[in-house]
Amino acid sequence: MILFFSILYFSSYLALPHHWTSDHYFKSTAHEKNILHYLKNEGNYSSFYDQIKDNDQLTEILQHGKDLLVFVPTNEAFKTFVPGFEDKNAIFSYHIASSSGRMSLARKPFDLTSGELLPSILADSSLKGGHQFLKVYLNEWQHGRVYIGNERSFSKVLGKPTVASNGMIFLIDSVLLPPYDIWRMINDIQFHGHLTNVVTMLEVSGLANELEMRQGLTFLAPTDEAFERLGPSAVRHLLSPTGKPLLRRILMYHFVPRETYYSHYVQTGDTTWETMLYGKPIQVHKISFQGERHFSSIILNEESRIIYGDVLCSNGVAHIIDNVLIPSWEMKELENI
């Protein structure tokens, strides 16, 4: 798992436009059997079917829904699955996505593009957008293997999908779990030591305790290297009692009071995001590179780049950035330290 997230982290610098196409999986004949039929009658899907068969809402969707992408854990995966206190309905709703409303550059309804977001049918009141997303990742270093999920819980897609009349079924190697809230995602994962400073800053400022209560947020999380570039005296000041008000204002400038997904803005181009620091804006600029591969990135205030986007959370989304965003009117206090 450590190696996998390291690959995810460093590959974000490359923003490779991987693409998985479903062309060679489709036949010219119509598929008359729906997804629920396959889940009920195919042995590979029996454990998943046993979990959802008594849920009228899910079975109705799987039988009559359209353009569905269903990610089914193997029977072997369920042998080690322990739901604990988590809502099983939420867990299995998170395995069902729609190919409509996607944030994607996919050319066809069932193609998968690296970094794209698939809207699951898991509704979450903590998200202003309404539904939790699944993230697609195609790993070139592992011969184009496809992963699905979020930074808490990724699963590998196994083999060819089953094509039904109302969508496709993908077999995956583990049960997917919905993401935690922003604070827990940043605190628990920390991208293997790259986010320890921002975790400390959130705790010192008191914002860590407030995050669980807030809904529909975007958090721009600077790396440890970003804080180190401020200099040791500036960091000591921010962590001191006298520097706490400034620290809180700087961190509030890293929050946007709505979900802003990288997968969307990397396609749409320049805009502004109003922050939670009195609505002060951040300038969002898309840059594109042409070469052996074409890829795009997002620059904030012409000084900080999103180096890893769309860390999905139960109450919003986080993006990892490579420089601390400091409003110009706050720079004087740091410069005078």
Image (tube, grey):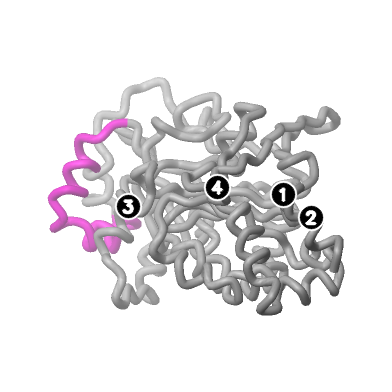
Residue 88 position (above or below residue 220): below
Give the CA distance from mark 4 to mark 2.
17 Å
Q: Report the quarter where the N terminus lies.
A: bottom right
Magenta stretch, residue numbers: 43-66
Query: Which one is earlier in the sequence, the residue at label 3 or at label 4?
Result: 3
Give the CA distance from mark 1 to mark 2.
7 Å
* Residue bearing the label numbered 1: 327
Query: Which one is earlier in the sequence, the residue at label 1 or at label 4?
Result: 4
- Please state if 322 lies on the left or on the right of 109 as rendered: right
Is mark 1 in CB contact (under 8 Å) with mark 2?
Answer: yes
Is mark 4 in CB contact (under 8 Å) with mark 2?
Answer: no
Provide the secondary structure element on which disc 3 rests. loop
Residue 50 within the segment the image draws in magenta: yes
- Report which quarter residue 34 is drawn in: top left
* Residue bearing the label numbered 2: 331
* Residue bearing the label numbered 3: 124
Give the CA distance from mark 3 to mark 4.
27 Å
